[in-house]
Image (cartoon, helix red, strand yellow):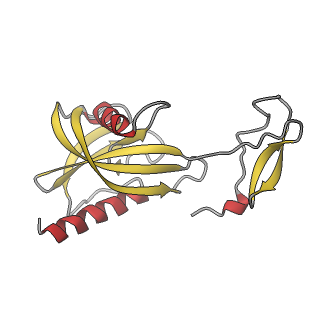
Amino acid sequence: MINRKKIYHPLFRFCPFCGNSLHYKHNNNVLRPLCLQCGYAQYLNPTVGVAVVLVESGKILLGKRNRPPFPGKWCIPCGHVEWGEDVREAAAREFEEETGLKVRILDILDVHSNFHNPKYLTVGLWFLGKRIGGTLKAGDDLDEVAFFPIEKIDVELAFPTDVKVIERLRSNQKQKGV
């Protein structure tokens, strides 16, 4: 977790409404940009990330990242929700862009706040998915896609929250006796 009292917004220098310089003041115990001219307070909120967990025959589909952050490391295929887009539609779209597979979005498996990159915070939603079509092929942010046994993933994962999600998946499967 990030110390909210020390949050700094280096992206914002000018008020988006009146154009005057923003000044940094504590507001609700958080350092944030305020416009002294019109009173506007700039909030920096996390974006929403979505991922689809596809498990087939005891194996989970992972992708090898080809760009920052963490190029060369593996992750559950994921992406961001676009403005005006439903989270489930975004999850299916991102999954298809990255893996070539079409999925039906099922239940939410897990939700986490992502603090691994303090400059770009996200809230992640991991959905379970079921394959309904397409051809497996890496695309977009991924160089490779492959299935790994859930109980023995022998590649380095990019995101700490993916580790938590996989642990949750393992725990759920043990409870169900799978």
Residue 132 placement (x, y as % from top left): 15, 35
Q: Residue at x 77, y 55 (%)?
A: 27
How many marks are shown on the rendered structure? 0
Left or right relative to 141: residue 145: left
Front residue of 171 and 157: 171
Quadrant in which the N terminus is drawn:
bottom right
Residue 115 placement (x, y as % from top left): 53, 57
Left or right relative to 60: residue 110: right
Left or right relative to 118: residue 93: left
Q: Residue at x 78, y 37 (%)?
A: 13
Rendered view: 150 above or below 94: below
Quadrant in which the C terminus is drawn:
bottom left
Front residue of 27 and 164: 27
Q: Residue at x 65, y 45 (%)?
A: 44
Residue lying farthest to the right in this orientation: 37
Front residue of 146 and 19: 19
Q: Residue at x 33, y 43 (%)?
A: 77
Residue 78 placement (x, y as % from top left): 37, 43
Based on the displayed image, in which of its 4 quarters is residue 164 positioned? bottom left
Residue 94 placement (x, y as % from top left): 35, 35
Left or right relative to 25: residue 81: left
Based on the displayed image, in which of its 4 quarters is residue 41 positioned? top right
